Image (cartoon, rainbow, N blue to C red):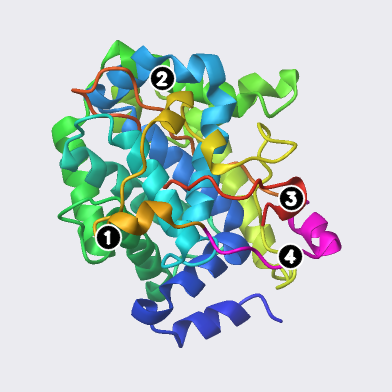
Protein backbone atom coordinates (compact mmCIF):
# COMPACT_ATOMS: atom_id res chain seq x y z
CA UNK A 1 0.00 0.00 0.00
CA UNK A 2 1.36 3.42 -0.99
CA UNK A 3 1.16 6.61 1.07
CA UNK A 4 -1.71 7.95 -1.03
CA UNK A 5 -3.56 4.67 -1.64
CA UNK A 6 -6.38 5.43 0.79
CA UNK A 7 -6.78 8.93 -0.62
CA UNK A 8 -7.26 7.49 -4.11
CA UNK A 9 -9.95 5.15 -2.77
CA UNK A 10 -11.64 7.93 -0.79
CA UNK A 11 -11.88 10.15 -3.87
CA UNK A 12 -13.94 7.45 -5.57
CA UNK A 13 -16.41 7.26 -2.65
CA UNK A 14 -19.64 9.18 -2.07
CA UNK A 15 -19.39 11.02 1.26
CA UNK A 16 -23.18 11.10 1.62
CA UNK A 17 -23.29 7.30 1.59
CA UNK A 18 -19.84 6.39 2.91
CA UNK A 19 -19.17 9.17 5.41
CA UNK A 20 -18.75 6.82 8.37
CA UNK A 21 -16.13 4.72 6.57
CA UNK A 22 -14.28 7.82 5.37
CA UNK A 23 -14.40 9.28 8.88
CA UNK A 24 -12.93 6.07 10.29
CA UNK A 25 -10.03 6.19 7.81
CA UNK A 26 -9.33 9.87 8.60
CA UNK A 27 -9.38 9.47 12.39
CA UNK A 28 -7.77 6.03 12.78
CA UNK A 29 -5.36 5.75 9.85
CA UNK A 30 -4.62 8.90 7.86
CA UNK A 31 -4.56 11.65 10.53
CA UNK A 32 -5.16 10.14 13.98
CA UNK A 33 -2.83 12.43 15.95
CA UNK A 34 -3.66 15.54 13.93
CA UNK A 35 -7.38 14.95 14.24
CA UNK A 36 -7.17 14.76 18.01
CA UNK A 37 -4.99 17.86 18.25
CA UNK A 38 -7.53 19.71 16.14
CA UNK A 39 -10.36 18.62 18.41
CA UNK A 40 -8.35 19.58 21.50
CA UNK A 41 -7.73 23.10 20.20
CA UNK A 42 -11.37 23.29 19.13
CA UNK A 43 -12.56 22.63 22.65
CA UNK A 44 -10.33 25.37 24.00
CA UNK A 45 -12.36 27.69 21.82
CA UNK A 46 -15.46 26.93 23.87
CA UNK A 47 -13.77 28.62 26.81
CA UNK A 48 -13.59 31.88 24.87
CA UNK A 49 -17.36 32.21 25.41
CA UNK A 50 -17.97 33.60 28.93
CA UNK A 51 -21.40 32.07 29.48
CA UNK A 52 -19.91 28.62 28.86
CA UNK A 53 -16.69 29.07 30.82
CA UNK A 54 -18.40 30.65 33.86
CA UNK A 55 -20.50 27.55 34.32
CA UNK A 56 -17.52 25.25 33.91
CA UNK A 57 -15.51 27.35 36.32
CA UNK A 58 -18.18 26.99 39.01
CA UNK A 59 -18.20 23.20 38.74
CA UNK A 60 -14.45 23.01 39.50
CA UNK A 61 -14.50 19.72 37.55
CA UNK A 62 -11.21 20.42 35.82
CA UNK A 63 -9.52 21.40 39.05
CA UNK A 64 -10.68 18.24 40.83
CA UNK A 65 -10.73 15.62 38.09
CA UNK A 66 -9.39 17.08 34.87
CA UNK A 67 -7.94 13.85 33.49
CA UNK A 68 -11.20 11.97 34.06
CA UNK A 69 -13.21 14.67 32.32
CA UNK A 70 -10.76 14.49 29.42
CA UNK A 71 -11.03 10.70 29.19
CA UNK A 72 -14.81 10.75 29.52
CA UNK A 73 -15.06 13.03 26.51
CA UNK A 74 -12.88 10.75 24.42
CA UNK A 75 -14.68 7.56 25.39
CA UNK A 76 -18.19 8.92 24.92
CA UNK A 77 -17.32 10.29 21.49
CA UNK A 78 -15.77 6.94 20.58
CA UNK A 79 -18.98 5.13 21.52
CA UNK A 80 -20.93 7.31 19.10
CA UNK A 81 -18.98 6.08 16.09
CA UNK A 82 -17.51 2.75 17.19
CA UNK A 83 -20.17 0.44 15.73
CA UNK A 84 -21.77 2.91 13.31
CA UNK A 85 -23.93 5.89 14.09
CA UNK A 86 -27.15 3.95 13.57
CA UNK A 87 -26.12 1.21 15.97
CA UNK A 88 -27.74 0.64 19.35
CA UNK A 89 -24.44 1.49 21.02
CA UNK A 90 -24.40 4.93 19.39
CA UNK A 91 -27.99 5.53 20.46
CA UNK A 92 -27.19 4.43 24.00
CA UNK A 93 -24.35 6.95 24.02
CA UNK A 94 -26.70 9.68 22.80
CA UNK A 95 -29.25 8.86 25.51
CA UNK A 96 -26.54 9.07 28.15
CA UNK A 97 -25.28 12.42 26.87
CA UNK A 98 -28.81 13.79 26.69
CA UNK A 99 -29.41 12.57 30.23
CA UNK A 100 -26.46 14.69 31.41
CA UNK A 101 -27.37 17.79 29.43
CA UNK A 102 -31.09 17.44 30.17
CA UNK A 103 -30.50 18.84 33.64
CA UNK A 104 -29.91 22.29 32.18
CA UNK A 105 -31.65 24.79 29.92
CA UNK A 106 -28.98 25.13 27.25
CA UNK A 107 -29.43 27.53 24.33
CA UNK A 108 -29.55 25.75 21.01
CA UNK A 109 -27.01 28.26 19.66
CA UNK A 110 -24.43 27.07 22.17
CA UNK A 111 -25.00 23.45 21.20
CA UNK A 112 -24.56 24.38 17.55
CA UNK A 113 -21.33 26.25 18.17
CA UNK A 114 -19.70 23.51 20.24
CA UNK A 115 -20.73 20.98 17.60
CA UNK A 116 -19.24 23.21 14.90
CA UNK A 117 -15.89 23.37 16.72
CA UNK A 118 -15.59 19.57 16.49
CA UNK A 119 -16.05 19.78 12.71
CA UNK A 120 -14.14 22.93 11.80
CA UNK A 121 -11.27 22.55 14.29
CA UNK A 122 -9.88 19.25 12.96
CA UNK A 123 -10.27 20.35 9.34
CA UNK A 124 -8.29 23.54 9.87
CA UNK A 125 -5.59 21.83 11.94
CA UNK A 126 -5.05 19.05 9.39
CA UNK A 127 -4.93 21.48 6.47
CA UNK A 128 -2.27 23.48 8.32
CA UNK A 129 -0.20 20.79 10.03
CA UNK A 130 -1.15 17.45 8.52
CA UNK A 131 1.02 15.60 6.02
CA UNK A 132 -1.51 16.58 3.34
CA UNK A 133 -4.73 18.59 3.23
CA UNK A 134 -8.12 16.93 3.54
CA UNK A 135 -9.91 16.03 0.33
CA UNK A 136 -13.43 17.24 -0.39
CA UNK A 137 -14.82 13.82 0.49
CA UNK A 138 -12.97 13.75 3.83
CA UNK A 139 -14.07 17.27 4.68
CA UNK A 140 -17.72 16.50 4.06
CA UNK A 141 -17.48 13.27 6.06
CA UNK A 142 -16.47 15.32 9.12
CA UNK A 143 -19.50 17.53 8.59
CA UNK A 144 -21.93 14.63 8.09
CA UNK A 145 -20.69 12.80 11.20
CA UNK A 146 -21.10 16.03 13.18
CA UNK A 147 -24.56 16.54 11.72
CA UNK A 148 -25.68 13.05 12.72
CA UNK A 149 -24.32 13.49 16.25
CA UNK A 150 -26.28 16.71 16.56
CA UNK A 151 -29.46 15.02 15.34
CA UNK A 152 -29.10 12.30 17.97
CA UNK A 153 -28.69 15.02 20.59
CA UNK A 154 -31.87 16.78 19.45
CA UNK A 155 -30.09 19.92 18.23
CA UNK A 156 -32.00 21.97 15.65
CA UNK A 157 -30.79 24.14 12.78
CA UNK A 158 -27.73 21.98 12.06
CA UNK A 159 -25.82 22.96 8.90
CA UNK A 160 -26.04 20.52 5.99
CA UNK A 161 -22.39 20.71 4.91
CA UNK A 162 -18.94 21.85 5.95
CA UNK A 163 -19.36 25.35 4.52
CA UNK A 164 -22.39 25.83 6.75
CA UNK A 165 -20.50 24.66 9.82
CA UNK A 166 -17.57 26.99 9.07
CA UNK A 167 -19.89 29.99 8.63
CA UNK A 168 -21.72 29.20 11.87
CA UNK A 169 -18.42 28.73 13.73
CA UNK A 170 -16.91 32.03 12.61
CA UNK A 171 -19.99 34.23 13.00
CA UNK A 172 -20.68 32.87 16.49
CA UNK A 173 -17.14 33.67 17.61
CA UNK A 174 -17.40 37.20 16.23
CA UNK A 175 -20.49 37.75 18.36
CA UNK A 176 -19.63 35.82 21.53
CA UNK A 177 -15.85 35.84 22.09
CA UNK A 178 -14.97 38.10 25.04
CA UNK A 179 -12.54 37.97 27.92
CA UNK A 180 -13.71 36.84 31.34
CA UNK A 181 -11.55 35.66 34.28
CA UNK A 182 -13.41 32.33 34.18
CA UNK A 183 -12.18 31.80 30.62
CA UNK A 184 -8.56 31.85 31.74
CA UNK A 185 -9.13 29.66 34.81
CA UNK A 186 -10.84 26.89 32.84
CA UNK A 187 -8.32 27.06 29.99
CA UNK A 188 -5.39 26.96 32.42
CA UNK A 189 -6.86 23.92 34.18
CA UNK A 190 -7.26 22.18 30.83
CA UNK A 191 -3.68 22.97 29.79
CA UNK A 192 -2.44 21.53 33.08
CA UNK A 193 -4.08 18.22 32.18
CA UNK A 194 -2.26 18.19 28.83
CA UNK A 195 1.15 19.12 30.25
CA UNK A 196 0.94 16.41 32.92
CA UNK A 197 1.33 13.78 30.20
CA UNK A 198 4.98 14.83 29.85
CA UNK A 199 8.04 14.75 32.15
CA UNK A 200 8.38 17.69 34.54
CA UNK A 201 11.25 19.26 32.60
CA UNK A 202 9.21 19.38 29.40
CA UNK A 203 5.97 20.76 30.84
CA UNK A 204 6.79 24.48 30.53
CA UNK A 205 7.89 23.92 26.93
CA UNK A 206 4.70 21.96 26.12
CA UNK A 207 2.54 24.70 27.65
CA UNK A 208 4.24 27.41 25.58
CA UNK A 209 4.07 25.34 22.41
CA UNK A 210 0.35 24.74 23.00
CA UNK A 211 -0.29 28.48 23.29
CA UNK A 212 1.94 29.20 20.28
CA UNK A 213 -0.45 27.45 17.88
CA UNK A 214 -3.54 29.38 19.05
CA UNK A 215 -4.79 32.38 17.08
CA UNK A 216 -4.82 35.87 18.58
CA UNK A 217 -8.63 36.29 18.96
CA UNK A 218 -8.76 33.08 21.01
CA UNK A 219 -5.74 34.05 23.12
CA UNK A 220 -7.31 37.43 23.83
CA UNK A 221 -10.59 35.83 24.90
CA UNK A 222 -8.74 33.38 27.16
CA UNK A 223 -6.60 36.10 28.70
CA UNK A 224 -3.24 34.82 27.45
CA UNK A 225 -0.63 36.93 25.74
CA UNK A 226 0.63 35.79 22.34
CA UNK A 227 3.88 33.88 22.57
CA UNK A 228 7.03 35.62 21.26
CA UNK A 229 7.56 35.35 17.54
CA UNK A 230 10.52 32.91 17.85
CA UNK A 231 8.38 30.53 19.92
CA UNK A 232 5.51 30.66 17.44
CA UNK A 233 7.89 30.18 14.54
CA UNK A 234 9.62 27.23 16.23
CA UNK A 235 6.30 25.50 16.99
CA UNK A 236 5.08 26.02 13.42
CA UNK A 237 8.28 24.73 11.84
CA UNK A 238 8.40 21.71 14.17
CA UNK A 239 4.88 20.69 13.17
CA UNK A 240 5.54 21.26 9.48
CA UNK A 241 8.76 19.22 9.72
CA UNK A 242 6.80 16.38 11.31
CA UNK A 243 4.31 16.57 8.42
CA UNK A 244 7.11 16.42 5.84
CA UNK A 245 8.59 13.35 7.49
CA UNK A 246 5.22 11.57 7.66
CA UNK A 247 4.68 12.23 3.98
CA UNK A 248 7.59 9.93 3.19
CA UNK A 249 6.74 7.17 5.66
CA UNK A 250 4.60 4.11 4.89
CA UNK A 251 0.89 4.43 5.75
CA UNK A 252 -0.56 2.89 8.88
CA UNK A 253 -1.51 -0.73 8.05
CA UNK A 254 -5.15 -1.86 8.16
CA UNK A 255 -4.51 -4.14 11.14
CA UNK A 256 -3.20 -1.28 13.31
CA UNK A 257 -5.85 1.43 13.80
CA UNK A 258 -5.09 4.30 16.12
CA UNK A 259 -7.01 3.79 19.40
CA UNK A 260 -7.32 5.63 22.67
CA UNK A 261 -6.07 4.20 25.96
CA UNK A 262 -7.78 6.13 28.77
CA UNK A 263 -5.57 6.90 31.75
CA UNK A 264 -8.49 7.11 34.16
CA UNK A 265 -9.79 3.57 33.53
CA UNK A 266 -6.87 1.12 33.50
CA UNK A 267 -9.13 -1.74 34.62
CA UNK A 268 -12.10 -1.08 32.36
CA UNK A 269 -15.22 1.04 32.49
CA UNK A 270 -18.97 1.11 31.87
CA UNK A 271 -21.04 3.87 30.37
CA UNK A 272 -22.28 4.90 33.79
CA UNK A 273 -18.67 5.56 34.81
CA UNK A 274 -18.48 8.34 32.23
CA UNK A 275 -19.57 11.84 33.05
CA UNK A 276 -20.51 13.40 36.41
CA UNK A 277 -21.44 11.06 39.27
CA UNK A 278 -24.99 12.37 39.53
CA UNK A 279 -25.85 11.36 35.97
CA UNK A 280 -26.59 7.77 37.03
CA UNK A 281 -29.54 8.92 39.13
CA UNK A 282 -31.29 10.64 36.22
CA UNK A 283 -33.67 8.64 34.03
CA UNK A 284 -32.81 7.90 30.41
CA UNK A 285 -35.17 9.43 27.86
CA UNK A 286 -35.82 8.06 24.35
CA UNK A 287 -34.33 9.87 21.39
CA UNK A 288 -36.60 11.97 19.22
CA UNK A 289 -37.13 9.17 16.69
CA UNK A 290 -37.72 6.46 19.30
CA UNK A 291 -40.76 5.25 21.17
CA UNK A 292 -41.15 5.09 24.93
CA UNK A 293 -39.71 1.58 24.94
CA UNK A 294 -36.33 2.85 23.75
CA UNK A 295 -34.96 3.18 27.26
CA UNK A 296 -35.51 -0.54 27.86
CA UNK A 297 -33.23 -1.58 25.05
CA UNK A 298 -29.86 -3.07 25.77
CA UNK A 299 -26.95 -3.18 23.35
CA UNK A 300 -26.54 -6.42 21.46
CA UNK A 301 -23.92 -8.78 22.88
CA UNK A 302 -20.45 -8.28 21.43
CA UNK A 303 -18.68 -10.96 19.44
CA UNK A 304 -15.72 -12.72 21.07
CA UNK A 305 -12.58 -10.63 21.15
CA UNK A 306 -9.25 -11.91 19.89
CA UNK A 307 -7.02 -11.07 22.87
CA UNK A 308 -3.84 -10.75 20.82
CA UNK A 309 -5.52 -8.36 18.38
CA UNK A 310 -7.04 -6.41 21.24
CA UNK A 311 -3.65 -5.94 22.85
CA UNK A 312 -2.25 -4.67 19.55
CA UNK A 313 -5.18 -2.29 19.08
CA UNK A 314 -4.71 -0.60 22.44
CA UNK A 315 -0.95 -0.32 22.14
CA UNK A 316 -0.86 3.28 21.00
CA UNK A 317 -3.79 5.60 21.52
CA UNK A 318 -3.67 9.41 21.48
CA UNK A 319 -5.39 11.76 23.86
CA UNK A 320 -8.35 13.69 22.56
CA UNK A 321 -10.27 16.70 23.46
CA UNK A 322 -11.80 17.43 26.81
CA UNK A 323 -15.40 18.08 27.57
CA UNK A 324 -16.27 19.42 30.98
CA UNK A 325 -19.18 18.30 33.14
CA UNK A 326 -22.22 20.51 33.62
CA UNK A 327 -22.49 22.69 36.67
CA UNK A 328 -25.10 22.92 39.36
CA UNK A 329 -27.15 25.79 37.97
CA UNK A 330 -29.88 24.73 35.53
CA UNK A 331 -30.30 28.14 33.93
CA UNK A 332 -26.92 28.21 32.22
CA UNK A 333 -25.38 26.33 29.33
CA UNK A 334 -23.38 23.30 30.41
CA UNK A 335 -20.09 22.04 29.27
CA UNK A 336 -19.09 21.54 25.67
CA UNK A 337 -20.69 18.83 23.59
CA UNK A 338 -19.87 15.17 24.33
CA UNK A 339 -21.58 12.22 22.68
CA UNK A 340 -22.88 9.75 25.34
CA UNK A 341 -23.23 6.06 25.95
CA UNK A 342 -25.50 3.80 27.85
CA UNK A 343 -24.40 1.52 30.70
CA UNK A 344 -23.65 -1.66 28.89
CA UNK A 345 -21.21 -4.46 29.48
CA UNK A 346 -18.09 -3.51 31.39
CA UNK A 347 -15.32 -2.61 28.99
CA UNK A 348 -12.12 -4.32 29.97
CA UNK A 349 -8.72 -3.22 28.68
CA UNK A 350 -8.86 -6.06 26.13
CA UNK A 351 -12.29 -4.96 24.95
CA UNK A 352 -11.62 -1.25 24.49
CA UNK A 353 -12.01 -1.54 20.81
Measured in 3D between alpha carbons, the distance from the residue under mark 1 to the one under mark 2, in whole angstroms, is: 39 Å
Is tag 3's residue or tag 1's residue first in the polypeptide sequence? Answer: 1
Near mark 2 (Cα within 10 A), the count class, few <14, some 14-19 or many ≥20, is: many
Measured in 3D between alpha carbons, the distance from the residue under mark 2 to the one under mark 3, in whole angstroms, is: 28 Å
User: For the magenta stretch, what is the residue range?
Assistant: 299-315
Near mark 1 (Cα within 10 A), the count class, few <14, some 14-19 or many ≥20, is: few
Taking 116 as reference, is 260 left or right? right
Q: Which mark is residue 338?
A: none
According to the picture, the residue beneath numbered tag 2 turns out to be: 186
| x and y, in percent, of residue 346 in the image | 65, 46
Taking 259 as reference, is 341 left or right? left
The residue sitting at 38% across, 63% down in the picture is 145
Measured in 3D between alpha carbons, the distance from the residue under mark 3 to the one under mark 4, in whole angstroms, is: 9 Å
Count of marks overlaid on the render: 4
Is tag 3's residue or tag 4's residue first in the polypeptide sequence? Answer: 4
The residue sitting at 35% across, 30% down in the picture is 335
Quarter containing the C terminus: bottom right
The residue sitting at 62% across, 25% down in the picture is 195
Above or below, comparing residue 337 to residue 52 in the picture? below
| Residue 274 visible in the displayed image | yes
SS for dot 2: helix
Asked whether disc 2 touches disc 4, contact meaning CB atoms under 8 Å apart, the reply is no
| x and y, in percent, of residue 229 in the image | 47, 29
Is residue 149 or residue 146 the one in the foreground? Answer: 149
Measured in 3D between alpha carbons, the distance from the residue under mark 3 to the one under mark 1, in whole angstroms, is: 40 Å
Q: Which mark is residue 256?
A: 4
SS for dot 1: loop
Quarter containing the N terminus: bottom right
Amino acid sequence: MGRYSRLHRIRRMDPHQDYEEIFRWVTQYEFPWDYLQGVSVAFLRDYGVPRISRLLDRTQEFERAGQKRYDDKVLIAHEMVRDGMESEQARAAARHLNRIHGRYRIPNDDYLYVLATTVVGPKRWIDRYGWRALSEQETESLALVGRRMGELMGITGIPADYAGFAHLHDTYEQRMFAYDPANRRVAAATLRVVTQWYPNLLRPLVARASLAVLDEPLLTALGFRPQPRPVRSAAHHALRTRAALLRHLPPRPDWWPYRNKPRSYPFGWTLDDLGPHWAQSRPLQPLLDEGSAATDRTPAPRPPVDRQQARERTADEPPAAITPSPADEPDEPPEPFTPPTRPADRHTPQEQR
